[in-house]
Image: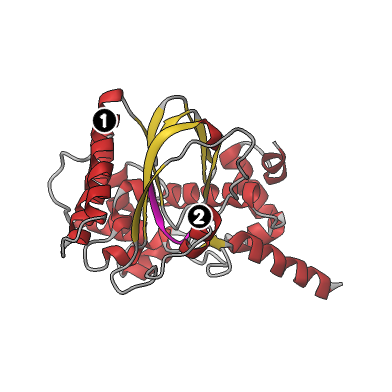
């Protein structure tokens, strides 16, 4: 009996941890794979959306990808990110990254638009993409656009097409700059509430390190099976600071307590696992660092006002 349970658990782990590679994307979408897809400079490509006949689309699985994607969509579609569902009625700019599972619905309703894909290695030594809010789990990933903004974004994509076809020796540097143009264009639409503050002080540095350490424990999959840092004191020990100092720094910079931020992130991951994995509630509880299922049940009810099973079934 225990052997059967273990086999089921391994299957569930595989289902949840399945990540679409960039090669699989090309095979699924175009039925071919570029020869230079894993070269030393990383990979970048840009495409224009093509009209799709109703009934000709295949469901795209809800999963993570091992590459980044920035997509301009003109049309009426639904995007599912982690535990969030976003409906766009006219036009928007979408950001996705390897840490957050997603899928897109109503593909046949896309009228026009563009998208570019690239991997982390394409930006090796050119910055950390994960420092930008559009690529963070708690950040905004969808930006609805006016007609004027669509025109501006379209201009950036057209420059990408021109550049990638050119023989210019430094064209990939130009393409990286154009990706940054898209990224900063979106973040300027919804600027951070703290964007007017001075460069990072000591409290902000500690808070940033705490948030990075928290995020490293996710997503929960076969490579991160158990969340081991659960309390503020755990993070303080890792960061080599007193827990009171960490609590003050986080409170000063985020206006939330350390425990509140940890709990919110665990709740977010619990919602993802409950909605988009076949794991049992007990497996999810264990993966998130709970020693007893009842502790997880009580924790989830406190923050969501629903039991885990009730949330899964609605």
Q: Outermost residue toward the left?
A: 198
| 292 vs 82: above or below | below
Residue at 44% across, 47% down: 260
Q: Which residues are magenta?
A: 64-70
Residue identifier under label 2: 30
Residue 247: percent from the left, percent from the top?
A: 34, 53
Q: Secondary structure at mark 2?
A: helix
Q: Is residue 10 magenta?
A: no
- The residue drawn where x is 48% and y is 50% is 265
Rounded to the nearest angstrom, the CA distance separating label 1 from label 2 is 27 Å
Q: Is residue 200 above or below residue 48?
A: below
Residue placed at 30% from the left, 64% from the top?
122
- 65 drawn magenta: yes
The residue wearing badge 1 is 151
**Circle 2 crowding by C-alpha within 10 Å: few under 14, some 14–19, many from 20:** few
Q: Is residue 72 visible?
A: no
Instruction: Spot the residue most to the right.
Output: 1
């Amino acid at each position: 009996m225990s052997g059967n349970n273990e086999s089921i658990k391994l299957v569930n782990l595989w289902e949840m941890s399945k990540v679409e590679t960039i090669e699989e994307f090309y095979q699924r979408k175009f039925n071919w794979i570029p020869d230079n897809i894993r070269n030393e400079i990383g990979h970048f490509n840009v495409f224009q959306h093509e009209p799709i006949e109703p009934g000709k689309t295949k469901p795209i699985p809800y999963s993570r990808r091992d590459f980044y994607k920035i997509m301009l969509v003109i049309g009426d579609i639904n995007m599912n990110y982690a535990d969030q569902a976003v409906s766009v009625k006219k036009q928007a700019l979408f950001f996705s990254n390897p840490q957050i599972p997603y899928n897109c619905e109503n593909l046949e309703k896309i009228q026009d638009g563009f998208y570019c894909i690239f991997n982390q290695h394409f930006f090796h030594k050119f910055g950390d993409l994960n420092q930008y809010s559009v690529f963070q789990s708690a950040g905004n990933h969808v930006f609805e656009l006016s007609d004027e903004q669509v025109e501006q974004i379209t201009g950036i994509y057209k420059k990408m097409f021109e550049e990638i076809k050119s023989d210019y020796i430094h064209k990939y540097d130009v393409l990286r700059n154009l990706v940054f143009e898209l990224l900063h264009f979106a973040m300027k639409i919804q600027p951070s509430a703290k964007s007017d503050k001075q460069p990072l002080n000591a409290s902000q540095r500690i808070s940033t390190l705490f948030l990075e350490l928290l995020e490293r424990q996710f997503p929960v999959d076969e490579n991160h099976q158990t969340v081991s840092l659960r309390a503020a004191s755990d993070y303080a020990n890792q960061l080599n600071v007193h827990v009171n100092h960490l609590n003050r720094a986080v409170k000063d910079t985020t206006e939330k307590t350390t425990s509140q931020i940890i709990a919110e992130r665990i709740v977010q991951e619990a919602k993802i696992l409950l909605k988009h994995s076949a794991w049992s509630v007990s497996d999810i509880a264990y993966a998130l660092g709970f020693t007893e299922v009842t502790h997880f049940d009580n924790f989830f009810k406190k923050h969501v006002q629903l039991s885990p099973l009730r949330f899964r079934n609605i």
